[in-house]
C-alpha cells in the first residue's frame, strides 16, 4: 500500500513538472509575440508620427502685380530679358502690402525667405506661357519655404521654429490668421519628381522608376525561374552535376543582396557597357537576386503535385512534355505565382544592389522609358533620410508609408491567390 502511494506521488510530481514546463513554454511564446507586436506598434507609430505631415503642403495666396518695370522686363518673349529679370520682386512687393514696415534691406531679405525658392520660377513660366499678362494683377498660389512649412505644421512645438527669426514667426502667424498661408493635401508629393527643396519634392519619379524596374525584373525572372524549376524537377537527370546546381541555387538565396549589385556593376556596366541609373539595368540586377527565390518556390509547388496526376496522364498516352505543360504547370501555377510575388516584394524593397549601379543619382524628371535616368522608392527614401532638412525627414517617413503600402498589397495579393487558387489533394 505504501509503495502504491509512493508511486502515485511520483506520478503527481512528474505531472506537475510537466505542466509547469508547458506553462513556461507558452509564456515564452506569448512573450515573443508580445515583443514582436510591441516593436511593430512602435515602428508604425514612429513612421506615422513623423510622416503624416509629409502629406500636407503649405501655400500662400497673394495678389501679385506683374509690373514689368519692377521686374526689369519689357518683353516676356525675349529670352535674354527673361534670363535677367527679377521675378522675386513682385512676390516681395505683394508681401510688403501686408507688412509695410518691412522696407530695410534686412527685412526684405527675411521677407523673401518666406516664399519657396521656386516661386519666382512660377511667375517666369506664367509670363512665358501668357506674355499678355505682363502688367496685370493675378491671384497666385505659391509653395512656402520649407522652414515656414515646418513651422506652420508644428505650430504647437517650439523646436520647429528655431530656423525662423522672431520677426519671421510674427509675419507667418499674421499671414495664417488672415488666411494667406494655408495648409491642404500635398498633391505635389504625388505629382512631381525629386527637388532640392522639400516643399517642391515629389515621389512620382521614384514610383514610376520602381514600376519600370519591377516590370523588367518580372519579365526576366518569372519565366526563367519557372523554366529552371520545371527542368530540375521534371527532366534533369539525378547526378552530381544536378545536385551541385541545386545546392548552389539554395545557397544563392542566402547571398547578401549587395553581392548582386557588385555582379551587376562588373558584368552589365563593366563588360557590356550599359548606362548607369536606368530601369533596365536595375531590373536585370534585381532579376538575378530574385531568381533563386522563384526557382525554390516553383520547385516546391511542382513537388506538391501528386504523382497520380502524372501517372493518370501518362496512362492515357500523354507524352512527358504534355504531362508537364497540360497538368503539372497549371496545377503548380498558384504556388509559383505566390512565390514570385513574394520575391518581387522583396526586390521592391531592396536598396543596396541599386546603390552600386548608380541609381542613387539626383533625378528631377519623371522617367519616360526603360532607358531614362531613374531612381526607385527605397533609394529615394534613403536620399531624403540622409538630408538634414526637417522637410525631407517628413518626406522620407511619408515615402516609407507608401513603400509599406505597396509591399503589404503585394503580400496580400499573394495570400489571396494562394487561398483562391489552391487545390487540396
Image: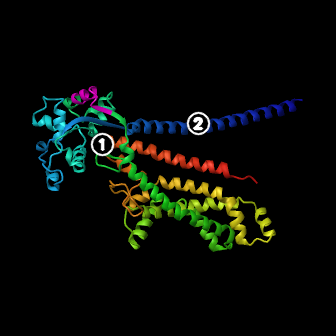
Q: Residue 179: name its quadrant.
A: top left
**Distance between the Cα atoms at labels 2 and 1?**
39 Å
The percent position of residue 241, horizontal first and vertical second, equals 62, 74
Q: Residue 105: name its quadrant.
A: top left
Which residue is rendered at x = 32% and y = 46% of the image? Answer: 387
As displayed, is residue 209 above or below residue 398? below
The percent position of residue 103, horizontal first and vertical second, equals 11, 33
Q: Tag count in the figure?
A: 2
Q: Quick one: 399 or 207, which is closer to the camera?
A: 207
Closer to the N terminus: mark 2 or mark 1? 2
Q: Does the magenta run of residues contain 173?
A: yes
In this view, which residue lies farthest toward the right? 1
Q: Quick one: 180 or 221, which is closer to the camera?
A: 180
Q: Does the magenta run of residues contain 391?
A: no
Do the residues bearing badges 2 and 1 touch, measured as CB atoms within 8 Å?
no
Q: What's the colour scheme?
A: rainbow
Q: Is residue 416 left or right of residue 345?
A: right
**10 Å crowding of disc 2: few (<14), some (14-19), many (20+):** few
Which residue is rendered at x = 61% and y = 64% of the image? Answer: 226
Q: Which residue is labeled 1 in the image?
A: 389
Q: Residue 122: name its quadrant.
A: top left
Using the rendered image of the protein, determine whether residue 351 is visible from the camera's viewpoint.
no
Using the rendered image of the protein, determine whether residue 226 is visible from the camera's viewpoint.
yes
Q: Which mark is residue 31?
A: 2
Q: Quick one: 85 or 42, which is closer to the camera?
A: 85
Q: The N terminus appears in which quarter of the rendering?
A: top right
The percent position of residue 26, horizontal first and vertical second, equals 65, 37
Provide the residue span drawn in magenta.
Answer: 170-182
The percent position of residue 20, horizontal first and vertical second, equals 69, 34
Q: Is residue 360 left or right of residue 147?
A: right
Amino acid at each position: 500500500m505504501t509503495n502504491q502511494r509512493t508511486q502515485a506521488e511520483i506520478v503527481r510530481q512528474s505531472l506537475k513538472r510537466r505542466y509547469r514546463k508547458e506553462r513556461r513554454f507558452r509564456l515564452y511564446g506569448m512573450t515573443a509575440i508580445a515583443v514582436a507586436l510591441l516593436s511593430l506598434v512602435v515602428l508604425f507609430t514612429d513612421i506615422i508620427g513623423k510622416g503624416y505631415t509629409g502629406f500636407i503642403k503649405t501655400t500662400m495666396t497673394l495678389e501679385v502685380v506683374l509690373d514689368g518695370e519692377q521686374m526689369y522686363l519689357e518683353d516676356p518673349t525675349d529670352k535674354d530679358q527673361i534670363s535677367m529679370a527679377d521675378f522675386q520682386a513682385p512676390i516681395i512687393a505683394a508681401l510688403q502690402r501686408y507688412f509695410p514696415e518691412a522696407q530695410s534691406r534686412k527685412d526684405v531679405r527675411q521677407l523673401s525667405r518666406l516664399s519657396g525658392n521656386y516661386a519666382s520660377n512660377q511667375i517666369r513660366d506664367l509670363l512665358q506661357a501668357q506674355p499678355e499678362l505682363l502688367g496685370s494683377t493675378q491671384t497666385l498660389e505659391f509653395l512656402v519655404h520649407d522652414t515656414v512649412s515646418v513651422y506652420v505644421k508644428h505650430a504647437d512645438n517650439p523646436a520647429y521654429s528655431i530656423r525662423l527669426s522672431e520677426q519671421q514667426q510674427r509675419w507667418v502667424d499674421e499671414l495664417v490668421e488672415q488666411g494667406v498661408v494655408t495648409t491642404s493635401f500635398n498633391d505635389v508629393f504625388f505629382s512631381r519628381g525629386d527637388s532640392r527643396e522639400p516643399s517642391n519634392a515629389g515621389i512620382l519619379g521614384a514610383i514610376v522608376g520602381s514600376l519600370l524596374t519591377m516590370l523588367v525584373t518580372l519579365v526576366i525572372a518569372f519565366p526563367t525561374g519557372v523554366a529552371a524549376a520545371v527542368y530540375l524537377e521534371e527532366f534533369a537527370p539525378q547526378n552530381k552535376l544536378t545536385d551541385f546546381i541545386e545546392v548552389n541555387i539554395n545557397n544563392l538565396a542566402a547571398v547578401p543582396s549587395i553581392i548582386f549589385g557588385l555582379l551587376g556593376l562588373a558584368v552589365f556596366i563593366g563588360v557590356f557597357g550599359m548606362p548607369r541609373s536606368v530601369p533596365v539595368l536595375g531590373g536585370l540586377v534585381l532579376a538575378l537576386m530574385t531568381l533563386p527565390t522563384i526557382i525554390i518556390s516553383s520547385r516546391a509547388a511542382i513537388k506538391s503535385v501528386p504523382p497520380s496526376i502524372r501517372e493518370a496522364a501518362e496512362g492515357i498516352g500523354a507524352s512527358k512534355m504534355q504531362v508537364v505543360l497540360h497538368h503539372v504547370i497549371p496545377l503548380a501555377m498558384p504556388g509559383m505565382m505566390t512565390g514570385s510575388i513574394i520575391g518581387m516584394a522583396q526586390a521592391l524593397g531592396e536598396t543596396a544592389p541599386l546603390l552600386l549601379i548608380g541609381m542613387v543619382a539626383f533625378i528631377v524628371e519623371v522617367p519616360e522609358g526603360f532607358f531614362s535616368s531613374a531612381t526607385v522608392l527605397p533609394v529615394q527614401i534613403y536620399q531624403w533620410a540622409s538630408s538634414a532638412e526637417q522637410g525631407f525627414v517628413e518626406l522620407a517617413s511619408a515615402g516609407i508609408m507608401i513603400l509599406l503600402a505597396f509591399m503589404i498589397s503585394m503580400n496580400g495579393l499573394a495570400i489571396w491567390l494562394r487561398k483562391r487558387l489552391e487545390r487540396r489533394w
